[in-house]
Amino acid sequence: MTPTFNPEPRTDALLAIVQLPASIPVATMAIAVAGAQNAALTAAALFALRDTAVAEQRDR
């Protein structure tokens, strides 16, 4: 039986990410400048959990 759902290739990749189980943490970002800025802020927040110097720079 052939599946009837046939998303575009980009949509297929997005669905693969957003449908991961709860035990796998995922941070998805938009594309372009806004996505890049949000990705940088997310990375800084993660590094700041273990590095006080990064936490101080992030909180400025």
Image: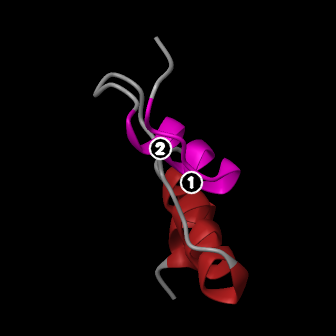
Task: From the viewer's side, name the closer residue of 37 and 49.
Answer: 37
Residue at 61 percent across and 76 percent down: it is: 35
Q: Position of residue 38 (x, y in %)?
A: 55, 75
Q: Position of residue 42 (x, y in %)?
A: 52, 63
* Location of residue 4 (image quadrant): top left
Q: Which residues are magenta?
A: 4-19
Against 44, residue 50 (above or below) is above
Does residue 6 show up magenta in the picture? yes
Residue at 56 percent across and 73 percent down: it is: 30
For the residues labelled 1 and 2, say whether their Cβ atoms are less than 8 Å apart: yes
Q: Position of residue 54 (x, y in %)?
A: 61, 64
Specify the label residue 39 is tagged with. Answer: none
Q: Secondary structure at mark 2?
A: helix
Amino acid of disc 1 = Thr
Task: From the viewer's side, name the closer residue of 25 and 51.
Answer: 25
Q: Position of residue 17 (x, y in %)?
A: 51, 40
Q: Residues within 10 Å of mark 1 (few under 14, many from 20)?
A: few
Relative to 54, 19 lies left or right:
left
**Residue for badge 1:** 11
Residue at 41 percent across and 35 percent down: it is: 25
Residue at the left extreme of this rendering: 22
Residue at the front extreme of this rendering: 1
Specify the label residue 15 is tagged with. Answer: 2
Distance CA(mark 1)–CA(mark 2): 6 Å
Does residue 39 show up magenta in the picture? no
**Res 57 visible:** yes
Amino acid of disc 2 = Leu
Residue at 69 percent across and 76 percent down: it is: 36
Relative to 46, 18 lies left or right:
left
